[in-house]
Amino acid sequence: MNIALGFANIVVTFSLVVLIEKLFKKEGVFAWIAIATILANLTVCKMIDAFGFTTSLGNVLFASTFLATDILSEKYSKKDAKKAVYLGIFAGITFIIITQLTLLFIPSSDDVVQESMKTLFGISIRTTIASMTMFFISNMLDVYLYNKLKDKFSNKLWLRNNVSTILCNCIENYFFNTLAFIGIFSIPVIISIATTTSIIEIIIALCDTPFLYLSKKLK
């Protein structure tokens, strides 16, 4: 069930990226980056089992930001792709600030959502800093690599898309897990977690290539 829903989630999410670009051009992709960053911070809280691994639902939304910046690099410019990454960071930081400020308010005696909000919006400063840092670095690296490969292999869209996305996803996973969990888990456990997550994200990354071709075809 989860595997079928997982592929449906990939198709729906990546289709929405293509659709928003078709309807609103690069401004739509900018908006998607902000939307995906915020929603990923919410859906990342839910863990599921798929392909024999335990993974987070936030992976697909985070992966969609790579598809979004690749579309911007392919159809618009490197400058636009970098701008989108900065927008994603701003959206993520804004989400964290507003949700943490919301939790500080003393709830009314009639309130029924405070405890649920604590569960959903509760954060670890260390993992949050690690997440935001690696989101920025991995997406900026993706923009850089994609455009370098575009210059060298202008007729191989699948190559620049998969190499940049997969490499940056793996770098993000290993460095994030190291920064977030060093001293908490042993190095072998950290490597195991990062490797498992990377396998899932490689599968997701391979699935985004047809959507990049579709976006390029839609003038």
Image (cartoon, helix red, strand yellow):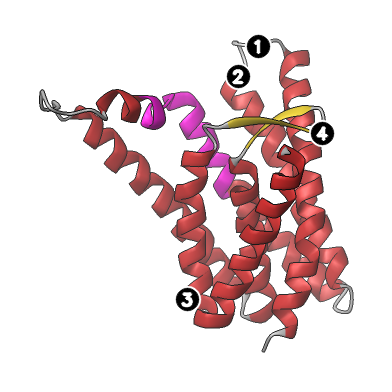
Residue at (65%, 24%) from the top-left corner?
178
Q: Could you tell me residue 186's position as x and y percent?
A: 70, 10
Earlier residue among tags 4 and 2: 4
Indicate the secondary structure of the residue bearing disc 1. Answer: loop
Mark 3 crowd level (few <14, some 14–19, many ≥20, 10 Å Cα): some
Q: Could you tell me residue 134's position as x and y percent?
A: 59, 41
Using the numbered discs, state the Cα–Cα distance from disc 4 to disc 2 in whole angstroms: 24 Å
Location of mark 1 (residue): 185
- Where 22 sits versus 152, above or below? below
Location of mark 4 (residue): 51
Residue at (44%, 24%) from the top-left corner?
124
Mark 4 crowd level (few <14, some 14–19, many ≥20, 10 Å Cα): few
Using the numbered discs, state the Cα–Cα distance from disc 3 to disc 4 in whole angstroms: 36 Å
Residue at (45%, 58%) from the top-left corner?
34
Task: Give the numbered dot on residue 181.
Answer: 2
Front position in the image: 129 or 111: 111
Asked whether residue 182 is in view, the answer is: yes
- Read off the magenta span: 119-136
Side of 203 where 70 appears, left or right: left
Query: Which residue lies most toward the bottom here?
Result: 219
Query: Which residue lies most toward the left here?
Result: 109
Tag 3: amino acid: Glu
Front position in the image: 156 or 119: 119
Indicate the secondary structure of the residue bearing disc 2. Answer: helix
Q: Could you tell me residue 10's position as x and y percent?
A: 69, 54
Earlier residue among tags 3 and 4: 3
Do labels 1 and 2 touch, CB within 8 Å? yes
Earlier residue among tags 1 and 4: 4
Using the numbered discs, state the Cα–Cα distance from disc 2 to disc 3 in whole angstroms: 36 Å
Using the numbered discs, state the Cα–Cα distance from disc 1 to disc 4 in whole angstroms: 24 Å
- Where 194 sits versus 188, above or below? below
